Image: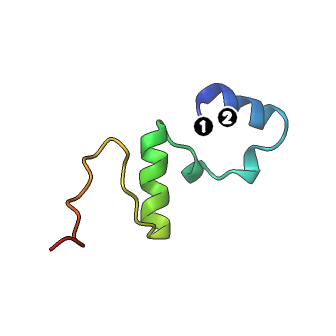
Amino acid sequence: MKGPVKDQLIRFGLGERFPPDHFFPTLGTAVDAYLLETGVQFQDWDDPEPPDQTRD
């Protein structure tokens, strides 16, 4: 979450529900942290697709 959103959460008394390690400077770093924490396999849409392994 960006600064203004984080500031609003704190202002409304919700800041403690979200520990500091849940705030990331960019969406990309948040996704990377999620993938590391959960072990989810993810293929980025911008990355080239891997070759089809099912063809002979």
Q: Position of residue 10 (x, y in %)?
A: 76, 36
Look at 44% across and 70% down and name the residue there.
39
Left/right placement of residue 31 relative to residue 21 reads left
**As drawn, is 28 to the left or to the right of 46?**
right
- Lateral position of residue 53 relative to residue 4, left or right: left
Mark 2, secondary structure of its residue? helix
Determine the residue located farthest toward the top in the rendered image: 4
Q: Can you tell which of label 2 and label 1 is closer to the viewer?
A: 1
Measured from the top left, where is residue 2 in percent x and y?
58, 31
Label 1 sits on residue = 1
Q: CA distance from mark 2 to mark 1?
A: 6 Å
**Can you tell which quarter of the image residue 9 is in?**
top right
Instruction: Provide residue 32's location: percent of width, then percent of height.
Output: 41, 53
Report if the CB atoms under discs 2 and 1 are less than 8 Å apart.
yes
* Quadrant of the snapshot with the C terminus: bottom left
The residue under the point 56% across, 44% down is 23
Q: How many residues crowd mark 1 within 10 Å: few (<14), some (14–19), many (20+)? A: few
Q: Report the residue marked by disc 2.
A: 6
Provide the secondary structure element on which disc 1 rests: loop
In the displayed structure, 56 sits above or below 22; it is below
- Front one among 52 and 40: 52
